[in-house]
């Protein structure tokens, strides 16, 4: 019989942020009980940690500041959101984006040329997902000989104020369908996104555990890269996730604290 996920060697941990460390909500949101201490215990055990997030409604610095306010021990170097990777792609390929973003996220693209756009970049724009803005993106893509749509994630929904709300993926799919194109996804579950965090840690995928609340993008995405994917029953988790038709989590735990208990108990 194969050993349980926590009985195998763990030399590094990747953590989702929203739904694992804290829940979105008014102000700075609310910490999920036990998560601050869980991160501290991983650090005290000497395990490298990276935070892989599809958060696209703020800058990395604002996100880190919020988490530090809640008591989490982390720096900007530990956090991997999609925006910096997208900026690198835009510069390398000489792309000038039409930005369909949350206003708080525009600062991520301050040094990117957006004149005469030749592609569309979209994040979780929330109230900016108006018909007018979606139609602008649609018309631009339809006008291009080789349309490029870059999406910072493809989540279906997430949890905010104890309710599930539409995520970026629904709007991405609308543009894909209308324009008959396929978006380039930068962020989870993209293998290149996970591999960047693994490379930064200097740990091979078979010795890393990813803890997340999204059974497809966190768990399925990490498993496709050779990691163990552990699903938490917090955040956007729904009981049906445990019987997902295509993704079988390596393990399911009540919360991050329980995952860390199991990791450290068997080290």
Image: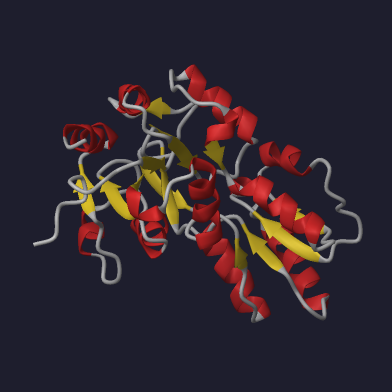
Residue 194 in sight in this render = yes
Q: Is residue 55 left or right of residue 42?
A: right
Q: Nearer the viewer, residue 18 or 168?
A: 18
Quadrant of image for the N terminus? bottom left
Residue 225: % across, % down: 42, 61
Q: Is residue 205 above or below residue 70?
A: below
Give left or right: position of 202 versus 135.
left
Q: Residue at x 36, y 28 (%)?
A: 46
Q: How is the image coloured?
A: secondary structure
Residue 6 locus on image (x, y percent): 20, 45
Q: Quadrant of residue 17?
A: top left
Q: Quadrant of the C terminus?
A: top left
Query: Measured along the vertical axis of the image, is residue 129 above or below residue 16?
Result: below
Q: Is residue 43 left or right of residue 187?
A: left
**Residue at (31% x, 53% y) in the render:** 229
The answer, for residue 27, to whether it is visible in the render is no
What residue sits 83% from the left and 66% below the top? 118
* 93 in relation to 210, above or below: below
| Image x and y of residue 146, in percent | 78, 78
Residue 81, image x and y in percent? 57, 44
Q: Residue at x 62, y 35 (%)?
A: 60
Q: Residue furthest left?
A: 1
Q: Quadrant of residue 73?
A: top left
In the figure, residue 72 lies in which quadrant? top left
């Amino acid at each position: 019989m194969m050993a349980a996920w926590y009985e195998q060697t763990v030399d590094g941990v990747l953590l989702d942020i929203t739904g694992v460390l804290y829940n979105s909500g008014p102000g700075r949101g609310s910490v999920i009980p036990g998560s601050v201490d869980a991160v501290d215990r991983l650090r005290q055990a000497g395990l490298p940690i990276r935070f892989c997030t599809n958060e696209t409604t703020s800058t990395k610095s604002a996100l880190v500041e919020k988490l530090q306010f809640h008591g989490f021990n982390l720096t900007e170097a530990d956090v991997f959101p999609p925006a910096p990777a997208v900026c690198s792609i835009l510069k390398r390929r000489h792309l000038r984006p039409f930005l369909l973003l949350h206003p708080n996220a525009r600062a991520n693209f301050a040094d990117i040329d957006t004149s005469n756009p030749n592609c569309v970049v979209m994040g979780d724009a929330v109230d900016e997902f108006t018909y007018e803005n979606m139609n602008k993106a649609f018309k631009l893509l339809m006008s291009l000989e080789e349309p490029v749509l870059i999406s910072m994630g493809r989540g279906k929904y997430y949890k905010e104020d104890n309710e599930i709300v539409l995520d970026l993926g629904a709007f991405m799919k609308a543009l894909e369908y209308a324009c008959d194109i396929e978006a380039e996804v930068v962020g989870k579950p993209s293998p290149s996104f996970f591999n960047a965090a693994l490379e930064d840690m200097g740990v091979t995928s078979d010795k890393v555990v990813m803890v997340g609340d999204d059974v497809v993008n966190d768990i399925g995405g990490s498993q496709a890269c050779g990691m163990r994917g552990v699903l938490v029953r917090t955040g956007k988790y729904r009981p049906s996730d445990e019987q997902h038709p295509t993704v079988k989590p390596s393990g399911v735990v009540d919360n991050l604290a329980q995952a860390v208990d199991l990791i450290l108990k068997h080290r």
